[in-house]
Image (tube, rainbow, N blue to C red):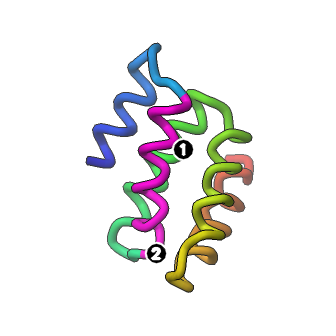
Amino acid sequence: MFELIALLATESSKLSKKDAFTAITGLVDKMSDIKLKGPAGEALTAMSEALGPQFVFTQLHKRAAAQKNPKVCPGMHVYVLAAQMPL
């Protein structure tokens, strides 16, 4: 599923913010799972490159703040910080 989202974000010229919003909503929960954090982060990075980091980070913040799982917020913060670091 994560690879499909990343592929759509990189290859599709018709990816809308509405589509990304739907995908981000599902990906937020996965960021707290140690096994799924990497693939979910790659999908988020692909969407960030396609639609801009401001949109993706804003949606991540909204979704993470609404989560009841205490592991989601630290996972999101680590992802956002890592995404902003230069290679």
Circle 2 residue: 32
Whether 80 is among the magenta residues is no
Residue 10 sits in quarter:
top left
Q: Residues within 10 Å of mark 2 (few under 14, many from 20)?
A: some
Whether residues under marks 2 and 1 lie with C-beta atoms below 8 angstroms apart, the answer is no
x 60%, y 62%: residue: 79
Q: Nearer the viewer, mark 2 or mark 1?
A: 2
Instruction: Say above or below: 29 vs 47.
Output: below
Q: Residues within 10 Å of mark 1 (few under 14, many from 20)?
A: many
x 40%, y 66%: residue: 30
Residue 21 located left or right of residue 3: right
Q: Position of residue 72 (x, y in %)?
A: 54, 75
Circle 1 residue: 45
| Circle 2 SS class | loop
For this rendering, which residue is in front, 81 or 23?
A: 23
In the rendered structure, which segment of residues is drawn in magenta?
17-32
Whether 25 is among the magenta residues is yes
x 51%, y 47%: residue: 44
Residue 75 sits in quarter:
bottom right
Q: What's the CA distance linking mark 2 and mark 1?
A: 16 Å
Among the two numbered marks 2 and 1 on one chain, the one whose residue lies closer to the N terminus: 2
Residue 79 located left or right of residue 84: left
Q: Position of residue 38 (x, y in %)?
A: 42, 61
Amino acid type for the residue under numbered disc 1: Thr
Residue 54 located left or right of residue 32: right
Q: Position of residue 45 (x, y in %)?
A: 54, 44
Amino acid type for the residue under numbered disc 2: Ser
x 51%, y 25%: residue: 16
Instruction: Say above or below: 70 vs 38.
Output: below
Residue 74 sits in quarter:
bottom right
Q: Position of residue 60 (x, y in %)?
A: 61, 56
Instruction: Say above or below: 23 vs 70.
Output: above
